[in-house]
Amino acid sequence: MDRRRFLKNSALALAAGSTMSITGMAGTNNPSAVDGEYPSPRKGSGVAKDFKYNSDGKFKVLQLTDTHVIFGDPRSERAYENVGKMLDIERPDLVIHTGDVIFGAPAEEGARKVLGLISDRKIPFAVALGNHDSQFGLDRKSIYDVIRTIPYNINTPADKGISKASNDVITLSGESGVDRVLYLFDSGDMMGIEDAGYDNVHIDQIEWYDAHSREFKAANGGKPVNSLAFFHIPPAEFDYCLRLSDDKGWNFIGHMGEQIGCSRLNSGLFQAMKMNGDVQAIVCGHEHNNDFVMQYKGIMLIYGRFSGCDTVYNDLKPNGARVFEFSRGERGFTTWVRLNSGEVEHRIFLDPPMENNFKAHKEPKK
């Protein structure tokens, strides 16, 4: 937690000296973004893009997180190298970056350089902003608008009538329609309430999710559509789960190298997801030394692998990325960690709810 405080103070100090602007860039229409394909009860919201399975019936998502680049800083080189390597090894159908893209000014140049590695390879990508992304001269909407102008970005405009900027819905469709939904939430920066600490997903964002969830369910004959949620700051349930694991002997898969940096207030998001019965996993970043998978009340809690560099603390080496693979007609999904060394760790097929010791999981199909 001391390191977190150090990062925050460093970020604010750097931001104070930055006056970068994006005059003429904010609000620019991105021809690669697909807006409004799916009707929603909320004005201005819609599906970012509807993807289809590949000819082999697979769809692969690469999660990058916490790249923390500073444009012009040689300490960022390891992040650029890692991002390029992960893309070339895994060749994903979609990239989701779960925030802290940058960690210094100039914000626009840093974001363009690291996310441009995805764009250069013509891979669709979306970003769920992290707490540090809006601390270097550009507010959340401004840095988000910059990101949306990068070719192959599929994020939709921020103005959805809900809190913050990077809230999106991505769908994956099979022969009979949408059979998987990927929700992106903007988990913010700091709560701004005494003793609350980090921000979380707000009530209006939960209502936005709930409206989509119910609509997908209705279109699916009254059955919840299997979903995953991606955002930066983990919800309080990550911390609850770890505390309970000590008492109940639950196991986790992966590395746990630091405390959970969640908000001290529970937003109610987990409860909404549990009641709707559609979200199989919550996928976050934020903690550089964690990449574990656990289960709490039938929902998988998953950390990405630190994808960044030497501008911030990183004791979990080498860096890398997390991968998710979905198969047509299969309820569960396979996930693994790809290391910068090229090796794969912790490959597992997840079909929650599962036994908390993971003994019930089956090996993924070859």
Image (cartoon, grey):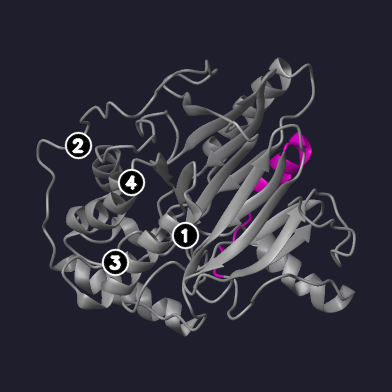
When the figure is inspected, residue 304 is found, relative to residue 188, above or below; the finding is below
Decide which of tag 3 and tag 4 comes sooner along the chain: 3
Bin the neighbour count of mark 4 within 10 Å (Cα to Cα): few under 14, some 14-19, many 20 and up. few
Q: Residues within 10 Å of mark 3 (few under 14, many from 20)?
A: many
Residue placed at 52% from the left, 59% from the top? 233
- Check if residue 2 falls in the magenta segment: no
Q: Type of residue at label 3?
A: Val
Label 2, label 3: how many angstroms apart (C-alpha)? Answer: 22 Å
Q: Quadrant of residue 176?
A: top right
Extent of the magenta region = 261-278
Query: Would you name the residue on which mark 4 appears?
Result: 121
Q: CA distance from mark 1 to mark 4?
A: 42 Å
Eyeballing the image, is 19 above or below 209? below
Say which residue label 2 marks: 26
Q: Earlier in the sequence, mark 2 or mark 3?
A: 2
- The disc at residue 193 is 1
Say above or below: 191 vs 173.
Answer: below
Q: Amino acid at mark 4?
A: Arg
Helix, strand or loop under label 2: loop
Q: Is residue 94 above or below residue 135?
A: above
CA gap, disc 1 to disc 3? 29 Å
- Counting from the top left corner in percent of width and height, residue 316 is at 52, 80
On the image, the x and y values in percent for residue 95 come to 45, 47
Q: Secondary structure at mark 3?
A: loop
Q: Give the Cα distance between marks 3 and 4.
A: 19 Å
Return the disc, 1 or 4, that comes first in the chain's sequence.
Answer: 4
Which one is earlier in the sequence, the residue at label 2 or at label 1?
Answer: 2
